[in-house]
Amino acid sequence: MTGELFEIKGNHFRVVSLDGHRISIRNVALKEEYGDQKVIVPGKTLTEISKILSGETQDLVDMYLTKNHIMFSFDDTIVVSRLIEGSYFKVDQMLSTDYETKVSINRREMLDCIDRSTLFVREDDKKPIVMTIEDDVMQLKMKSQMGSLDESILIEKEGKNIKIGFNPKYLIDALRAIDDETIDIYYVNPKAPCFIRDTDNSYTYLVLPVNFVD
């Protein structure tokens, strides 16, 4: 879990990362077709590269692969890294298209609300944010010794009502990585992971829930 999977098939490029609580998958179309490749790149390398990259969507990055190394070339920068040996986790077995509840919600409203909840939590405190989804409203609650949050956001819902808790940081990380104005979140039950994904399958974020006390 210290590396990220780079998988190339034809003109399809997929990046997968995970820890014990979440999975992130991004799919990108390449401009040309290439032979199949599957390598594991150290997470520290990618973290350093992300600090250097401008973030402009039109900027190009060239990648070169050998058996044991990967090289990134962009702007006036070249980064070379060893690859991690071994096989990656079989994440496709962890993903499911089944769900009991689907919610369509404004990403910015949800992100701002969860961000505000972290004001009431110390860095070492693991207080969850609790979502109660009923009809056309998602209610978000957070309680700690420093204060409490109780807000509601209008949603479009399909399926059952559900009450579920999450580590707010994991949701914030996922929401900040998405550009869409409206996102779809899929829930199975209060003990199963939720999925945030788009219809084009360009991204999938899986986040495990946490236990909470009413």
Image (cartoon, rainbow, N blue to C red):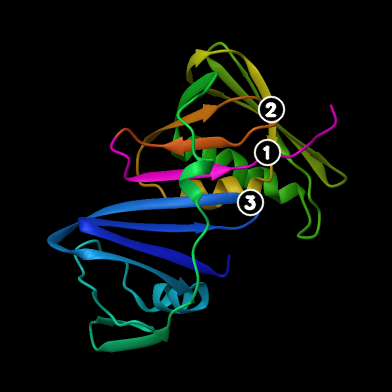
Are the residues tagged 1 and 2 within 8 Å (C-beta)?
Answer: yes
Q: Residue at x 38, y 79 (%)?
A: 52
Q: CA distance from mark 1 to mark 2?
A: 7 Å
Classify residue 48 as left or right of residue 139.
left
Camera-near label (3 vs 1) is 1
204 falls in the magenta region: yes
Quarter of the image that includes the N terminus: bottom right
Seen from the viewer's position, the closer of residues 153 and 97 is: 97
The amino acid pointed to by label 2 is Pro
The image position of residue 112, as x and y in percent, is: 54, 42
Are the residues tagged 3 and 2 within 8 Å (C-beta)?
Answer: no
Q: Residue at x 32, y 32 (%)?
A: 199
Q: Which residue is mark 1?
A: 209
* Pointer 3 or 1: first along the chain: 3
Residue 169, disc: 3
Using the image, determine if residue 13 lies above or below residue 163: below
First to last magenta residue range: 200-214
